[in-house]
Image: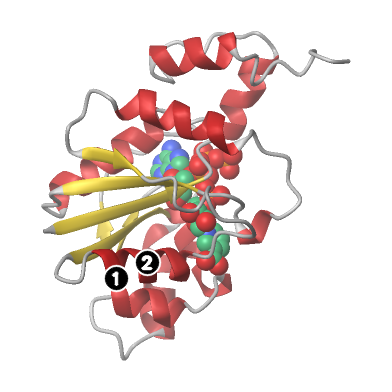
Amino acid sequence: MRLGIFGGTFDPIHIGHLVVAQVAMEEAGLDRVVFVPAGVNPLKVGRQITEGHHRLQMVKLAIADNPKFAVSSWELDRSGPSFTVDLMSHIRAQHPNDELFLIIGADNLRLLPKWKSVEGILEQATILALNRPGEDLKSSCQMVLALYPHINECVRIVDMPGLDISSTWLRDRLCKNLSVKHLLPAEVIRYSEENKLYDYSVGQ
Ligand SMILES: Nc1ncnc2c1ncn2[C@@H]1O[C@H](COP(=O)(O)OP(=O)(O)OP(=O)(O)O)[C@@H](O)[C@H]1O
Ligand SMILES: O=C(O)c1ccc[n+]([C@@H]2O[C@H](COP(=O)([O-])O)[C@@H](O)[C@H]2O)c1
């Protein structure tokens, strides 16, 4: 099986994430994509994020209609920063015969040299990198290939129409009571409203 792993904070999951996963799946011929909500991004420790169980539930709602998408709570069930090398080792142990692919956006490819044990990740999975407006994906790709020349074809570019959408922008809109219709799945909008996840006026 060709298995795609897609880690993210997903606070909240949006259509950019869903398009990334779908395009990567089709372009790389993946059989399945597993979304893995992060406990804490090791490079963003200290940033306030929505509780893990809510982010997990929003991912579940967002992917419910796609039989090739799945979700894992493995990182949320552990404490401490979510190092991708640990996740990949866990998945490798569970799926010893599968070919693994790590799906990341261009911003994360640019930051990859700051990640823990990048070689450990690249030895276990091929990276599928997708463009994001404002990022120079080709340069980041060349930079990574130059840093790890001994690992063959460790990064593959997957083209997608640039979607200038981020969770930060969506949280801001939700806080200001602006519409996020069509930018998040309707079930995710309903869940976030019911649970007042991005209503910063609560409690003030
Ligand atoms: N619009 C997008 N286009 C391409 N890749 C994306 C897009 N949005 C997110 N990604 C990628 O999805 C993964 C998870 O992203 P994340 O959950 O941090 O979303 P985000 O929108 O970047 O959030 P935030 O604004 O809170 O930083 C990362 O690899 C990121 O690069
Ligand atoms: O392993 C690392 O050192 C590392 C450093 C930064 C980010 N990551 C992972 O990259 C993924 C995307 O993070 P984010 O916050 O951009 O959604 C998420 O799964 C993080 O755990 C991993």
Residue pictured at 15% horizontal, 50% vertical: 27
Give the class, few, some or many, for how many residues have Cα within 10 Å of label 2's Cα (few <14, many ≥20). few
- Residue 4 at x, y percent in the picture: 25, 54
Is residue 204 positioned above or below 128 on the image? above
**Closer to the camera, 71 or 41?**
71
* Residue 35 visible in the picture: yes
Occupied quadrant, residue 18: top left
Name the secondary structure under disc 1: helix
Q: Look at mark 1 in the image and give the residue it sits on.
A: 93
Give the class, few, some or many, for how many residues have Cα within 10 Å of label 1's Cα (few <14, many ≥20). few
- Residue 102 at x, y percent in the picture: 33, 60
Residue type, numbered disc 2:
His
Quarter of the picture holding the N terminus: bottom left
104 lies left or right of 117: left
Residue pictured at 39% horizontal, 83% vertical: 146
Residue pictured at 14% horizontal, 45% vertical: 26
Q: Which mark is residue 90?
A: 2
- Residue 134 at x, y percent in the picture: 50, 47
Q: Which mark is residue 196?
A: none
- Residue 104 at x, y percent in the picture: 39, 54
* Residue 11 visible in the picture: no
Is residue 84 positioned above or below 122 on the image? above
Q: Are marks 2 and 1 in contact (CB under 8 Å)?
A: yes
Q: Is ligand 2 less than 8 Å from the beta carbon at label 1?
A: no
Q: Is ligand 2 less than 8 Å from the beta carbon at label 2?
A: no
Occupied quadrant, residue 69: top left
**Closer to the camera, 192 or 181?**
192
